[in-house]
Amino acid sequence: MTQYKSTAKTDSQGTKLDPEGRIEYLHIKAGDILTGRYEVIRELGHGAIGRVFHCRDMVAGREVVLKTVFSNIDQNDMEILRREFEIMNKLHHDDIVSVIDWVEDDFRGYIVMEYVEGETLAAYLEKHRKLEVRIVSDVARQIAVTLDYTHKKQIIHRDVNPNNVILQTTRGKGLSVKLIDFGLSLKIQEDTSYVTCLEKNGTPGYMSPEQINPKYYNGRLTVNSDQYSLAVLVYKMLTGQFPLYNNCDKLTWNTKLNDALNKALASQPEKRFNSCLDFVMAMQTRESFQPYEMISKELLKTLRPKHMKWIGYVLTFAFVLILLFSLLPSKHGISEEELKNRVFIEKEKKAIEAEREQIKVEREMNEEECRKMKLECAKMKKVYSKIKSECVKIEENQKIIVEVKTEIRENEFVGITEGISKKVVTEHESGTVTKEINQQRQEFVIVINGFMYEFIFVPSGTFMMGGAISGNNCNNDEQQHIVTLTQGYWISKKLVTNGQYYSIKKKQQLYTYYKDKPKVGINWTEVKGFCTILTREARKNGQIPEEYEFMLTTESQWEKAVQEGYIFLVEDKCEWCLDMYESYPNQPVSDPIGARGTCHVIRGGAYCYSSGECRIKDRISRRASYRNRKLGFRVVLVPINRQDTIQAENRMSCEN
């Protein structure tokens, strides 16, 4: 993949940002699990729009490569990544990295590709700088065949450079090539031989003139643009330098190479070769192949056919005479030279036999070691089976403990709920129980999908809502008025965390490090969906009665709980409310819901523009699609009847 300088930034708190200063919500590091299937081993590199990771497929048991974007905020980058997947999915060639799948999660999409061991051509050139003509010819031929294949598929690569070529050493075959990174590729339109592009994209030094100055060429790119980049790559492999002004006169030792390179580097695309393979074949020289012996054509011309017959007879007769003389015994027996040869042969035989014996002993030792290893493996399997059985028992015990705890909490909750209903009736009749409930607070805890939710009961009562307009930092929409809540409610003591949110969404593995931090950056519609799913899960587990449900806090519920000390402002965080925004009334009200506005109320103490925003009385409004990294939420547990009334009034206000 093309290497670029990192443009990642961080804010004052060390939060990682993308190149445009936006928050990167997903911090990927070694050991993380992506899409619930791919374990990150290491980062291979990064490009203009994203990063590439070496991963392990935990399902298929193989190593793969995942390519993704920096941030899910810029949809243009995601479309470029998806287009690259669609192009690579149409290419099936041995010298092109194969694409396996396209996967997505809540944050971004990923291209899954095969993992190729080897090094880039750029790294190879850093070690050797200049390559032999024979090696250059072999590498260029493979790249040319691959590019011609992509051109037949009506695809222009647009980024042929050493960083996008992987070299593999194959035993008996020399160097093999893999072409990667189709992020800048474009597809040629049907019934045309070009594609229109006015953007300057590519790697400097390897870009063709029509890529550098697209307006001069009317924005037309053809397959000959890749041929120009291939010619620059060939020149760089031969000389270690870039060609100067499209002139290859530095290769004075080879005129044929000069002519081929000058034609492929022509400034006008139509003056280049018809294909990349034609260019590589035109540059083939004697040095491009392995040396071999051959009979001179001039010598063959001097040997006439009538002489060939007699020369064959003479050579055969001479060979027979030499063979006969070698078989005749010597007058003096075995010669001294022949005796030395026999002694040498005997020594060689003994040395070979000794080596064979040594190999045999080493093989027996290896077999013995293999037997020991097998015995150890068998022992380890037995130990593993014991540990596995113990783990199963522990899991069963944990399930039993969770069931017992759940039953205990259900009984406690039912008892507390009954007590509350009685006290609410008593309060409605006599109006003297409010003080008693404030003095003795009632709390309960439930566990859903492994995460704890703590609630505290806020009794019904009357309080002063809003602030004095003449006060410091007060706004005109904070008119003081008397509010009466006719029914008590359970409110969560803390903001909903990342762990709680993603456990309900069945995606808690995506946020393991920040599971105890408040869930922020969420809009009002997503909060409503969370409350619906949370109610369903709690009812399914029998943790709340059927006549209760979880909802967002209303503005009056939130302010009463804060004023009376049941909950506290979270540092530099604000919260969504259920109400639609409208100005406070000038008269006492009961159970207000604020249903006439077009935006939803936000309360809390997040500092954005002024110190007045950190007050309890401060209130702002935003549309349901609004997001902010300081904006979270908490939930309340209330009877269904009351919330049905609120929803009905909301629907009536929308219809009006």
Image: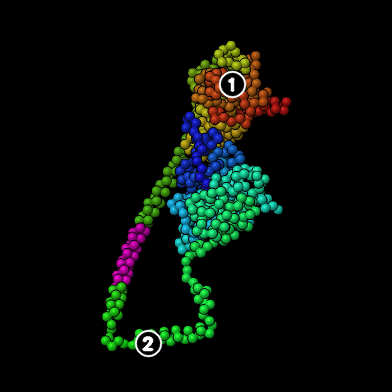
Left or right of 325 in this view: 176? right
Name the amino acid type tagged 2.
Leu
Left or right of 382 in this view: 161? right
Q: Which secondary structure type mostly characterizes the magenta part of the structure?
A: helix
Region in magenta: 350-375
Nearest to the observer: residue 468 or residue 495: 468
Residue occupying image coordinates x 49% and y 86%:
310
Mark 1, residue position? 619
Q: Is residue 22 above or below residue 572?
A: below
Q: Position of residue 512 (x, y in %)?
A: 48, 38
The color scheme shown is rainbow
Mark 2, residue position? 324
Report the mark closest to the observer, 1 or 2.
2
Q: Dot 2: few (<14), some (14–19), or many (≥20) neighbours within 10 Å?
A: few
Name the amino acid type tagged 1.
Arg
Q: Residue furthest right?
A: 656
Q: Position of residue 37 (x, y in %)?
A: 51, 47
Q: Is residue 14 above or below residue 165?
A: above
